[in-house]
Image (tube, helix red, strand yellow):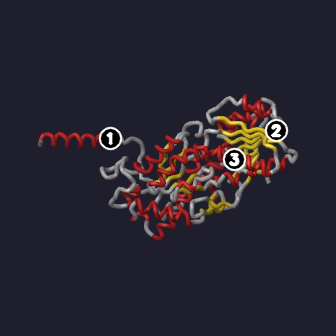
Amino acid sequence: MNNAIARTTALLSTCALLLTGCGGGTKTVTNSPTNSPSSTTNNTATNTAATTGTSSGAIPIGIAVAQTSNVALLGQEEVAGAKLAEKYFNSKGGVNGTPIKLVFQDTSGDEAGAINAFQTLINKDKVIGIVGPTLSQQAFSADPIGDRAKVPIIGPSNTAKGIPEIGDYVARVSAPVSIVAPNSVKAALKQNPQIKKVAVFYAQNDAFSKSETEIFQQTVKDQGLELVTVQKFQTSDTDFQSQATNAINLKPDLVIISGLAADGGNLVRQLRELGYKGLIVGGNGLNTSNILPVCKALCDGVLIAQAYSPEHPGEINAAFRKAYNDEYKKEPPQFSAQAFAAVQVYVQALQALDKKSKVNKLQLPELRTELNKQILVGTYNTPLGEIGFTPIGEVIQKDFYVAQIKMAKDGSQGKFTFLK
């Protein structure tokens, strides 16, 4: 028996050494037997430094967005905005002298990727809160995990109906599609008051696109227009010849597309190649400069409603805009601004909480709970303008815009021009 115990002890010691050596990568926290990757968020820790990562001199905030897959065209912009926020707020002293540290996990483009990213950030990386995921479709699957673990979640680009209602720990800085989407249809009518017939396209496998198209279709009816056809596609599709031809045969004056950047850009291109010459309205999934290399010169004229303008007045937006221009040599897009704003909310909520109860003296479960409360009662002057939250986590935002894509004739470059 004693020999068996000795062999078991030696084996466990070897395993511990192997686990330590195979950790790999840059980690915010060091796992111990009572703080392992498989531990739940309710584990009792001896102090907040051990559980939040401040022992390494920084407070970890999780960033769970799509860095791969076709959704990466949006997620990469969110990574850029989050990194600029990390640099900016740490240069200002972080959380009353303690820096923040962003911990990135790739959600890819599906629900499973988002779930895995959330579980890793919560249970292994021990973050105090999460910015993400990129898609509403992913949020409906991953956000309940964070809510059950009582980890604050701020959606940077989740605009579908019902996101804040997922749980008490779920909020978003992305205004709901019901507020933003109608603005682009109204802008199209202003440009061409003769619009009568409308064709709608949407990605039926994406929760956000399905939610957004309902708003678009209702707006069409509210404006007294005729909805001549509703065409469905998949976000993974590249060939839209059949749907585009069916719509064009009905002679629409306006086309409205709810999809993502890659599929939406290809649909725009193929509509133009098949001879459609009317106005096109793109939904929020097309709201990225990454669409420009997809449809190139044929992107010209597409109208897209915006929750952000680089020209918005204010010190914080001026700083964000300059930092983005310096880094990427172009104007910042909405998804970057929203990710920046989400990180800002965490930082300023932590600052306010720290003044009432020092965050480095709170154990992780309590810190997450108190931080969530603070987030919801705060007001934040962000690049998006002044925002706050309703008691259920819905963003309160005042300023909205509509932009139109303007492309060079050769399609080599383009930009979003904001309409007055």
x%, y% of residue 243?
73, 32
Q: Nearer the viewer, residue 149 or 297?
A: 149
Residue, disc 2: 252
Residue, disc 3: 214
Give the number of the disc on residue 21: 1
Q: Is residue 76 above or below residue 360?
A: above
Q: Nearer the viewer, residue 157 or 28?
A: 157
Of marks 3 and 1, the one in the foreground: 3
Q: Quadrant of the N terminus?
A: top left
| Res 68 visible | yes
x%, y% of residue 4?
15, 40
How far apart are the two marked residues, 3 and 1, measured between alpha carbons? 52 Å
Of marks 1 and 2, the one in the foreground: 2
User: Of the residues shown, which amino acid type is indicated by label 2?
Assistant: Pro
Of marks 2 and 3, the one in the foreground: 3
Q: Is residue 179 above or below residue 390?
A: above
